[in-house]
Image: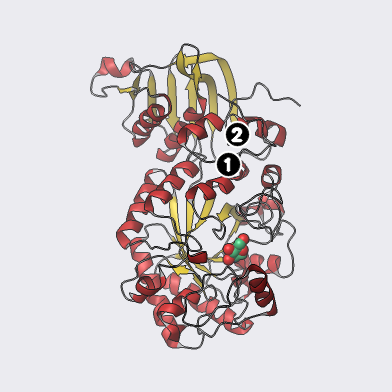
Amino acid sequence: MVFTHSLPLVPAPVSATAGEGRMPIAATTRVLGSSPAAAQLIDAVERRSGIRLSAADAADAADSASADIELRLDPAVAAPEGYALTVGDRVELVGADEAGLFYGVQTLRQLLREEEHGWGFLRAEIRDAPRFGRRGVMLDVTRHFFDVDEVKTFIDSISALKFNHLHLHLSDDQGWRIQIDSWPLLTELSSSTAVDEARGGFYTKDDYREIVAYAEERHVLLIPEIDLPGHTHAIGVAYPELVEEPVVSDALRSESLQQGQPLPVHGEAYLGTGVGHSSVRIHEERTYEFVRDVVRELAEITPGPYLHVGGDESLGTPQADFDLFAERVTAIVVEAGKTPIAWHEMGSAADIAEGTIGQYWGKTTPEGTHAEEAAHFVERGGALIMSAADAAYLDMKYTADFPLGLTWAAIIDVRSAYEWEPTAVLDVPDDAILGIEAPLWSETTRTLSDVEQLVFPRAAAQAEVAWSPREAPERVWESFRVRLGSLAPLWKAEGIDFHPADEIPWSER
Ligand code: TNX
């Protein structure tokens, strides 16, 4: 099959028909609509083309009737987050809700083209709505820290692909990244470090609120994670009494030796990348006072319904202790009025709080006890987010010689990032799968530009897996790679440092 006539859109919409030619735009082109999406469209068009469209006067009937671009709401037009878009001699964008209008604007941005005589939108008739309500990306701000402006830039680029959740991994062995007033030493003593002596940092509560609000304006819900009971070495730098002596396995010893990294020492900063050596003290009530305070303070500044409590790779925590902790920590989150999310390992705990959401990070062919653990969240009335490590992990290398990234799960080229099916991994009902999340762990990414090299273009593959209907004729690699290639000029104009993978026919303009 050849897909030369498809519209250059990623993720592929539910249905799209290309029209003839383009609708030209100029500074005199008038946009009607009171939604924030109208202003976002005007700004985005200006950033790309230098043309500042004008706003039509909604109070003036003649002015509104003759507007060239009209945005309005109609809940009946599509499912939530959906929209209908017609580009003919004028643009009509109807959103099922504000998110739908925002996504219609993202589609318009991809239809904007420079032609001989100026800029215009490709003519098209589009109906669209997401397959999954949960389309997430995770950013690890612990191994390397990214400041508020960098996180905002990241939110801009992922929301343009119609992602609607951002999971921030806020604590790990190498650093603690969020202000907690009741335990001030966390940021005083444990936030300045990162992997390999890189600069650390943390978010004040105001910083965090600023990120939440910025994300919200782009229809992205923030999910904060405090990783427990393992990945907690940094907590022990601030409060040594909360954390056990490091458990140094043979694997950690040989890996550290090989990489020239020191072994973790209790109460001292850990700047290596080894995992599985730290654990909070499970049988000390003080640990739960700490957890309760952190959960309460985080819940207070998080308008979204979720708090992620980690649970991954607690290799040094005895299984019975781990299960006990999983039950207690998820109950504490429920008491604080939030829905807990945990990495799938916490599904080993029989009485994990009802309704807890599991995040599956095993492989597309599950190994060991991973599938069983994940299924237990569903048995407890919860559901699952799919982050299959050998398909959706954004921190794996594209090719063996790619300078950034890790390889433990797989080497993931763009095609393997694209060709996986989130409902086919586990033996659970399809409706137990909320959607997907693509994590970016930051062991090897020192700058936002490094992050972008790993995230783009593979996040676009995950966006299509999460958004586009499974049965759509365009939802195939041969179509995707061409449509993806057409995003290059937009990404360049936005300053996104994407990796120009040679599987993709990148277009020049
Ligand atoms: C495993 S995946 C981890 C992280 C590492 C990542 C690197 C998961 C839940 N835990 O601690 O950063 O591998 O790919």
Residue located at (27% from left, 14% from top)? 62
- Asked whether the beta carbons under mark 2 and mark 1 sit within 8 Å of each other, the answer is yes
Q: Name above or below for residue 192 compared with residue 324.
A: above
Residue 432 seen in render: yes
Q: Which residue is mark 2?
A: 12
For label 2, the crowd category at 10 Å Cα-Cα, with few meaning under 14, some 14 to 19 and many 20 or more, is many
Q: Residue furthest left?
A: 59
User: On the rendered image, what quadrant is the N terminus found in?
Assistant: top right
Q: Which residue is mark 1?
A: 467
Q: Nearer the viewer, residue 382 or 228?
A: 228
Residue 76 seen in render: no
Residue 7 sits in quarter: top right
> How far across and how far down the image is residue 159, in percent?
47, 42
Q: Name above or below for residue 161 compared with residue 404.
A: above
Q: Nearer the viewer, residue 136 or 51?
A: 51
Q: Amino acid at mark 1?
A: Trp
For label 1, the crowd category at 10 Å Cα-Cα, with few meaning under 14, some 14 to 19 and many 20 or more, is many
Q: Residue furthest front?
A: 260
Residue located at (71% from left, 70% from top)? 369
Q: Amino acid at mark 2?
A: Ala
> How far across and how far down the image is residue 136, in percent?
53, 51
* Circle on res. 74: none
Return the disc, 2 or 1, that comes first in the chain's sequence.
Answer: 2
Residue 126 sits in quarter: top right
Q: Is residue 475 left or right of residue 87?
A: right
> How far across and how far down the image is residue 308, in percent?
49, 65
Q: Nearer the viewer, residue 247 or 226?
A: 247
Query: CA–CA distance between discs 2 and 1?
Result: 8 Å
Q: Name above or below for residue 245 compared with residue 110.
A: below
User: On the rendered image, what quadrant is the C terminus found in?
Assistant: top right
Does dot 1 land on a helix, a strand or a loop? helix
